[in-house]
Image (cartoon, rainbow, N blue to C red):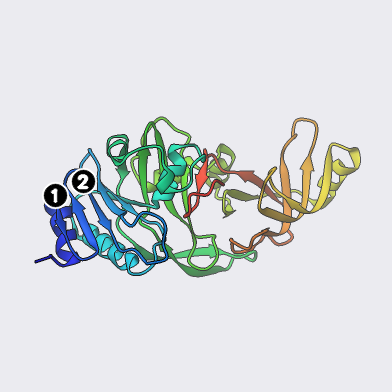
Amino acid sequence: MKNTHQQVIENFLQEGRGGRGTYVVAREKDQTVYSTHRSRWETRPSAIPLAVRLEDGGFLANGGSLAWPRSRHQDLVLRTLTRAQAPFGVVPFDSIAAAWTDGKVRNWFEAPFTLKDLRRETAVVVPSAGEEWREVTVKDKWGRDTTRNVHTLGDSVIRVRDQFYLSGVDETGMYRGIYFLARLVTDRAPASFSEALSFLKPKVVQEAEARGAYVRRQGEWFAIPTKLLTSQLFHDVGRGVAVRREQHVLGRDGHHRLEEAVIYRVGPQKGEVFARGVLSHTANEHVPLDLGFRWHQIVHNVQGASYSLGGNFD
């Protein structure tokens, strides 16, 4: 008689035992539990890994967006992991494939490595506390506090080969937030998730926060309030060392747009960007950030490649 899906998952996660249910299978050989449901019109492999036991004793759970009933099997795994004692991280496996291949492969089923490689070359550095709803507080352009709820995908830090990655949900994303897997520019493992977040802040942001400035953010871009006057910036525009732009898109292939910006082209401030008005996302993936009439310095975070829920390169 087949075990229930819950029994298969619990036996595997808690005791390392293999087992088989109607649509959930745990295999001791590759230390992985799978959802094997397959719709009649699907052409891709039916066995989708839900969680893998890593060689360090932790688990890597697949946080990808799965269709029902696979999503139900996925939810059972995540709930059981939350109750278990072993450390775990929740990361979409498509994003793992993208991170492993520097963005060349963004589909788990096309990944040029095996589950054995994954178990050996991946480790949980800062474990997840499980999925949850988190209330975040932000200030608007008048300094008033507003709150919104975001759905975390198990904030954690993992190591993929010799690189560290922060796995989390960006609360500046629309609706429930946007998942991202960002490579940390460090050769030292962060001690906590908050420390990993601090690794993303450039020095100018850290200095501004140390002064007590309220630095705001949209996606990978920080906005640091300044005391610059419009006359000062426009004077530099008139001298030819800076240019003024409306609806300026940040970055060569960027998706974040500034309503009004002054960009320095020459001189000691070359490359610096100042903006006021609304910072928006060209694809409406982030909540618009209204900077008001005060000029802010706009700076990019410190990270390597970043991958979305579907493994997309950012």
Circle 1 residues within 10 Å: few <14, some 14–19, many ≥20: some
Name the amino acid, label 2: Gln
Which residue is labeled 1 in the image? 16
Quadrant in the picture for the N terminus = bottom left
Q: Horizontally, is 12 left or right of 141 in the view?
A: left
Percent coordinates x, y for residue 88 in the rendering: 27, 50
The residue that appears at 72% across and 55% down in the rendered structure is 258
Percent coordinates x, y for residue 267 in the rendering: 79, 30
Percent coordinates x, y for residue 242 in the rendering: 82, 40
Residue 31's mark?
2
Vertical comparison of 181 with 76: above or below = above
Percent coordinates x, y for residue 167 in the rendering: 41, 49
| Quadrant in which residue 191 is drawn | top left
Q: Are marks 2 and 1 in contact (CB under 8 Å)?
A: yes
Q: Horizontally, is 235 left or right of 145 in the view?
A: right
Q: Horizontally, is 227 left or right of 221 in the view?
A: right
Q: Horizontally, is 295 left or right of 139 in the view?
A: right
The residue that appears at 85% across and 41% down in the rendered structure is 236
The residue that appears at 78% across and 47% down in the rendered structure is 262
Distance Cα–Cα, label 2 vs label 1: 7 Å
First of labels 2, 1 by sequence position: 1
Vertical comparison of 107 with 9: above or below = above
On the question of residue 232 being in view, the answer is: no
Residue lying furthest right in this view?
238
Name the amino acid, label 1: Gly
